[in-house]
Image (cartoon, grey):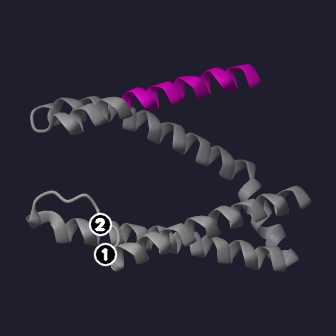
C-alpha cells in the first residue's frame, strides 16, 4: 500500500504543477502578455475562447485529480477503496482492450483523414501523416516490448 501511496503523491505533484502552469499561462493570456497565433481577424476571438476553454477544462481535471488523491491519502478506507478500484484485474483488462481497440480504430481512420485533408490543406495532411507514423511506431514498439516481457 505504501507503493501506491507514493504513486499518488507523484500524481499529485504532476497535477499541481500542471494546474499551476495552466493558471500562469491563462493569466498571462488574460493580461495580453502572450497571445495565441492569430490567423485572420475572423477567427481570432473564437481561437482565444477555444484555447481558454480547453485550458480551463484541463485545469479543472488536474484540480479534481489532486483533490481526489489528497482525500484518499488522508483517509485509509478511501485509499484502500481507490487502490482496489484501480488495480481490479477486470477493470485493467477492460481498459487495456479499450485502449488497444481505440488506437487501432484511430489508426484505421487516419488514412481517410490524410486523403481528404490532402485536397484542402497540406499542413493538416502532413500533420495527419506524422500522427499516423508516430502512432504506428508507438504501437509497434509497445508490441515488441510487451512480447518480450510476457
Q: Which residue is mark 1?
A: 32
Q: Residue at x 40, y 74 (%)?
A: 28
Horizontal side, residue 71 vs residue 51: left or right:
right
- Up-down relation of residue 67 to residue 5 (above or below): below
Residue found 14% across the figure and 64% down from its top:
43
Say few, some or many: other residues with alpha carbon within 10 Å of mark 1 (under 14 / 14 to 19 / 20 or more).
Answer: few
Viewer-side residue, 59 vs 88? 59
Q: Residues within 10 Å of mark 2 (few under 14, many from 20)?
A: few
Q: What percent of the width, then of the height, locates residue 110? A: 30, 34
Where residue 135 appears, as percent x and y from the top left, is 45, 32
Q: Is residue 29 left or right of residue 48?
A: right
Locate residue 68: give its quadrant: bottom right
- Residue 45: which disc? none
Which of the 4 quarters of the picture holds residue 56? Answer: bottom left
Magenta span has 133? yes
Q: Residue at x 75, y 67 (%)?
A: 82
Which residue is at the front of the view, 146 or 50?
50
Q: Residue furthest right?
A: 2
User: CB under 8 Å between callouts 1 and 2?
Assistant: yes
Q: Is residue 71 in view from this perspective?
A: yes
Residue 92 spot, x, y in % from top left: 68, 48
Helix, strand, or loop for circle 1? loop
> As displayed, is residue 32 above or below residue 104?
below
Residue 147 among those drawn in magenta: yes
How many angstroms separate mark 1 from mark 2 (CA)? 6 Å
Range shown magenta: 132-150
Instruction: Give the residue number, with chain letter if any, for mark 2.
Output: 35
Report the magenta stretch's main SS. Answer: helix
Residue 13, how many percent across, how many down?
A: 70, 65
Disc 2 secondary structure class: loop
Amino acid at each position: 500500500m505504501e507503493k501506491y501511496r507514493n504513486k499518488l503523491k507523484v500524481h499529485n505533484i504532476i497535477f499541481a504543477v500542471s494546474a499551476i502552469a495552466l493558471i500562469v499561462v491563462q493569466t498571462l493570456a488574460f493580461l495580453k502578455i502572450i497571445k495565441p497565433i492569430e490567423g485572420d481577424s475572423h477567427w481570432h476571438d473564437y481561437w482565444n475562447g477555444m484555447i481558454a476553454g480547453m485550458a480551463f477544462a484541463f485545469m479543472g481535471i488536474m484540480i479534481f485529480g489532486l483533490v481526489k488523491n489528497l482525500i484518499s491519502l488522508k483517509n485509509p478506507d478511501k485509499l484502500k477503496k481507490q487502490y482496489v478500484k484501480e488495480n481490479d484485474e477486470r477493470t485493467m483488462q477492460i481498459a487495456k482492450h479499450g485502449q488497444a481497440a481505440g488506437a487501432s480504430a484511430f489508426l484505421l481512420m487516419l488514412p481517410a483523414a490524410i486523403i481528404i485533408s490532402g485536397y484542402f490543406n497540406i499542413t493538416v495532411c502532413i500533420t495527419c501523416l506524422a500522427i499516423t507514423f508516430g502512432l504506428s511506431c508507438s504501437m509497434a514498439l509497445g508490441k515488441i516490448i510487451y512480447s518480450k516481457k510476457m
